[in-house]
Image (cartoon, coloured by chain):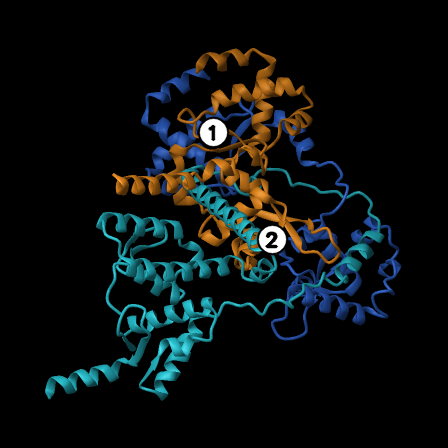
Chain colours: A orange, B blue, C cyan
Amino acid sequence: MDSPLRLIASNPVDRLARTVEALLVVASAPLSLGELADATEDDPERVETALSLLQQRYGEARSGIVLEQVAGGFAFRASREAAAACARLFERPVERGLSQAALETLAIVAYLGPCSRPEVARIRGVAADSAVASLVERGLITESGRELQAGGAVRYRTTPLFERVFGLESLAALPRLDDLGEDVGEIRERLLEVAQARAS
Amino acid sequence: MDSPLRLIASNPVDRLARTVEALLVVASAPLSLGELADATEDDPERVETALSLLQQRYGEARSGIVLEQVAGGFAFRASREAAAACARLFERPVERGLSQAALETLAIVAYLGPCSRPEVARIRGVAADSAVASLVERGLITESGRELQAGGAVRYRTTPLFERVFGLESLAALPRLDDLGEDVGEIRERLLEVAQARAS
Amino acid sequence: MPATPVRELELDLDAFEGPFDLLLTLLLKEELEPREVDVSAIVLAFVELMAERNELDLEACGEFLVLISALLELKARALFPDEAAELGELEPEEAARELARRLAEYRRMKEAAAWLRERLASEGDRWFRLGPASLAPREERRLAPQDPEALAHVLRALAHPPPTVSLGHMALRFPPVSLFLERFRALLSRRRRFDFDAEVGDLSRVEQAVALLALLELRKTGEIALDQAAAFASIRVSRADEERILEWTARSA
C-alpha cells in the first residue's frame, strides 16, 4: 500500500489524483469519467489511471472513505466497517419504511420504464398512486414526459439516486428477469416426484 | 506521509480515525467533537487524537481532500490546488431546456397567474412539489402571498428572470390561447375539467 | 359438512403459514391480499398430502377444486380489476394465453421486487452523503433562451381531453364476499334456515363460489350451522343460536 503512494508522489498523475479526490469530496452526486475529465481539463485515460490509484488508496478495510463505481460514475462513501457509527448519526430517509407496494412499483419502473401510473396499476392489479407519490418524494423515481397520445398520463423513470441506494453501476446491472424465477420448473419437478412415488 | 500511516495501522486510534473520516465524508454539515464522540461511542480525547491524525493526513498541499475546522465543527473541503477544477465542476454548462414537469408547471403559473402547488397538482394530475421547488431554485417563479382562506397554501408567480429567459416584455406578451377559452377563468375551468376526466 | 382434510391442509407459503381455512378466512376479511398468495404452492401441498394418504378421497378433491378455483378467480380479479371484461371478449384460448402472459409478467415483477428488497438489506451498510457537501461551492444553473410557444403548447396538451375508455362491457363483475355475508345474515334474520342451493341456484358459478366462501366464513365465526344429508346433497344453513337452542332442548329433555 505504501509503494503506489510513494510512486505517485513524484508522478504528475499524483497531482491529477489529488484534484480528482477533491472533486469527489465536494460533488453532490457520482461523477462520470467525462465530467471528471472536463473539470480537470485532462485526458480521460489519465483520469482513469488516477481513479485506479484512488481506488487502491480508498479501498474497503483500508480506509474509512471508500471510492465506489456506482450510478454511472464514481463517488465516495463511508466504509462498511463504519456503518454502525453512521447509523447512530444519520438517517436513511430514502429507503426507510419502503412498502411492498412501493418496491413492486419501483421494480416495474426500473425494468419497464419509462412507464405511467396506469401501466403500473395494470401489472400490479391495484392503483399505484400512493406508491408512485412516495417514490417520487423519496427521489427514487422522477417524471419522464407523458404518454405519446394527447392528454396522456405522466410517465416515470428511476433516478441515479435509485442506482446509488441499491448499489448498482447502472440499470444494466439489474439481474435479468429470466434469471429470477426458476420456480415453474421446480413445481413441475415436485409434481413429477409425487407421480413417480404413486406409480411405484 | 507514509510513516504516520504505518504507525496508526498498528494502533487502535487508526480504526477510530477511519470511522471519523467515514462520518465526515457522509455528513452534509460540519460535525462537532461531541457528535463524533457520540457516533463513534468513543472518548472525546481519543476522537481529538484521531482528528489530529486526520488533519496531518488531509492537509493542504498533501491531499486533495482537506480537513477543515470551522465554526460548527469539522468538515472536508476541496484543496486550494483543486479550486479551478471545482469551479469548472460547479459552473454547469448552460442547460438547453426544461423538463416536461417544469414546463407544464411554469405554463400554468404564467397563464393562470398566482397559483398554489395544490392547484398546479390538480391540473397536472400529479404532485407538483419537486417541479415547483426546482423552478423556485432556478429563480423562474417565486412566492406571491397565500390563498385567501385561512391557512391557505402559498401561491407562486413568475419572475422577471422568467420574462427574460422567454424573451417576453411582460406576461401580456405570452402567446394567445383563445382556442382554449375567452379569459383566464374559462381556461382554468377547462383545464380542471379535463384533469378531472383524466383522473376518473 | 364433515371435516375434510382440505381445510385443515397445512400450508407454508411466503405470505402465510397455517391451515388452509385460516388462509381463506384472512382473504375473506381482506387481511391478506389474494395476489400475495401463491396458488401453485397450495395445489402442490394438496397433491402431496393426497399422495401421502395413498387413497383417493373424491370428496376432498371436489371441495379442494371448488375452493381453489374460487381463490384463483379472486386472485385473477384482483390482478386485473378492469380487464376481465376485455379478456372476456377474446377467444378462450387467446384469453388463457393473455392471462398467463400477464400473470407471468406480474410474477416476474414480484420477483424483481423481492430482489430489490434483498439488495436493500445487503447494501444497508453503504452510507453516502445525500445532498451537497457543507463546504462545497454553490451550484449555479443557467438556462438558455426559451421559446414562449412551448408554454402555450404544453397548456394546450393539458387541455386536451384524454382518450375515452369504453365501459360498455363492465357488466361482468366479481361480487365482493361481503355482499353474500350481508345477504345471508339478512336472510337468517328473517328465516331460521334456508337451502343454499335454492338460494344461489340462479347465480353464475363465480358468484356461487363466492357465496360458498361467505358461508364458510359465517360458519367460522360461529354465526351459522351447516348441515348436509349426503355428499352433493343440498346444504342447509341455519342460525347457530337456533341449533344451540335445539341442542340445549334436546339435552334437557
Residue B90, how many percent across, how many down? 67, 36
Q: In the rendered structure, which disc, 1 or 2, sits on the residue that comes first in sequence?
A: 1
Q: Is residue B6 left or right of residue B127?
A: left
- Camera-side mark, 1 or 2: 2
Residue flagged by tag 1: what amino acid is it? Val
Image position of B77 with respect to C40: above or below = above
Residues at marks 1 and 2, CA–CA distance in whole angstroms: 39 Å
Image position of C75 with respect to C54: above or below = below
Q: Quadrant of the N terminus of chain A?
A: top left
Question: Which residue is label 2 attached to?
Answer: A119
Q: Quadrant of residue B183?
A: bottom right
Residue flagged by tag 2: what amino acid is it? Glu
**Residue B184 — which label?**
none
User: Looking at the picture, do discs 1 and 2 lie on one chain?
Assistant: yes
Q: Quadrant of residue C243?
A: bottom left
Q: Chain of mark 2?
A: A
Residue C200, how many percent across, how many down? 42, 75
Q: In the image shown, does C176 or A67 lie closer to the viewer?
A: C176
Query: Is residue C124 something one can see in this rendering?
Result: no
Label 2 packing within 10 angstroms: few (<14), some (14-19), many (20+): some
Q: Quadrant of the C terminus of chain A?
A: top left
Label 1 packing within 10 angstroms: few (<14), some (14-19), many (20+): many
At a point 75% along the width and 60% down the height, the residue shown is: C158
Image position of C146 with respect to B49: above or below = below
At a point 36% along the width and 21% down the height, the residue shown is: B9
Query: Is residue B53 something one can see in this rendering?
Result: yes
**Residue A66 — which label?**
1
Secondary structure at badge 1 equals strand
Secondary structure at badge 2 equals helix
Image position of C107 with respect to B91: above or below = below
Residue C57, how many percent across, how many down? 26, 57
